[in-house]
Image (cartoon, rainbow, N blue to C red):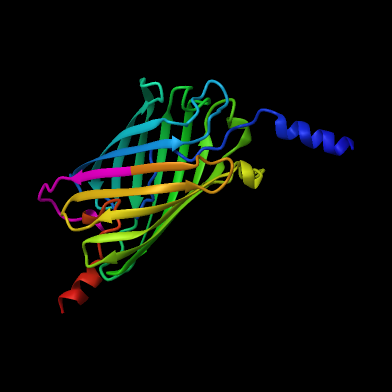
Amino acid sequence: MARAVTLSFALLAPRRLLAVDPFEIQVYDGTANAPGQPGLELHLNTVPNGRKSAPGPEVAPDRVTHLTLEPSFGMTPFWEIGGYFQTALRGDGTLTYAGIKLRSKFVVPFPEGVHYRLGVNVELSILPEAYDQSRFGSEIRPIACWENEHFIIAVNPIIDASLAAPDFAEGPSFEPALLAKAKIAGAVALGVEYYGNFGPIAHVSPWEQQEHYLYEVFDLLSVRDVELNAGVGEGLTNGSNRWTVKMIFGYVWDVGGGASLGAQARHRGRAITRAARATAAE
């Protein structure tokens, strides 16, 4: 009986609310801008039916629209830097500043003919308390991708950590993301994306408190240097938002420099590997 009472109090006690990053719903595919090549993405998503409570002073995600600008720049064939400027439109119509993030992405410069890509992205964030009660955070995102002329599969086993109280003591959390898409006539790609948050690695949260989403997604492939990704996501647990609608629009400028590995495919499920291109041309 005493054990049951203790468990009940533990479940009712305030604790960190799990949250998949609502400002960047994207799986990285291991590509990068060419040296000297700038790019810009607009991330837009809205939560028409979401969680209606959050630990103070954070804003509950229900009926919140997230808008993020992400500039990027290729430093070398294997190194890209970028950042995020985040805003949020709340359900009452108030547009608020939602923080900044800085990132540095490294990709492995494999030779031509290889169908897989590897990399890692590192981020630091400074957010208002309304969007992260700890304010300061970090993310390490390993990247693994396999792609040919018909399919693309990518996995990001993300490690996220708060760098300040109150969440710092709980340690890093595990937030995996993956995609699987089929390319159709070189024009579009259709498939699914998954995003999850299992909670702190040291003590994984109960299933119903975790966040898990499955998105049905569409990518435009047929317009050079343009990225368009859109999808609808369903929450799979009680701790998830029930519905989320997202879109990413991006553009990279052709500056006439040398092409880096996957430069034309940055953050999209649209490119085929150089070996696949050569095979298709024969």
Residue at 50% from the left image edge and 42% from the top image edge: 242
Counting from the top left corner in percent of width and height, residue 223 is at 16, 54
Counting from the top left corner in percent of width and height, residue 165 is at 58, 25
The correct choice, above or below, for 202 with respect to 261 in the image is: above
Counting from the top left corner in percent of width and height, residue 96 is at 36, 21
- Residue 253 appears anywhere in the view: yes
Residue 67 among those drawn in magenta: no
140 sits to left or right of 76: right
- Residue 147 appears anywhere in the view: no
The correct choice, above or below, for 120 with respect to 48 in the image is: below
Image quarter (top left, top right, bottom left or bottom right) of the N terminus:
top right
Residue 257 among those drawn in magenta: yes
Image quarter (top left, top right, bottom left or bottom right) of the C terminus:
bottom left
On the image, which quarter does residue 270 sit in? bottom left
Residue at 40% from the left image edge and 21% from the top image edge: 92
183 sits to left or right of 136: left
**Which region is colored magenta?**
247-263
Residue with the most extreme left position? 256
Counting from the top left corner in percent of width and height, residue 243 is at 45, 42
Count of number-bearing discs: 0
On the image, which quarter does residue 273 sit in? bottom left
11 sits to left or right of 70: right
Residue at 42% from the left image edge and 36% from the top image edge: 48
Task: Give whichever of 282, 124 is nearer the camera.
Answer: 282
On the image, which quarter does residue 260 sit in? bottom left
Residue with the most extreme right position? 1
Task: Give whichever of 219, 163 is nearer the camera.
Answer: 219
Task: Give whichever of 173, 103 is nearer the camera.
Answer: 173
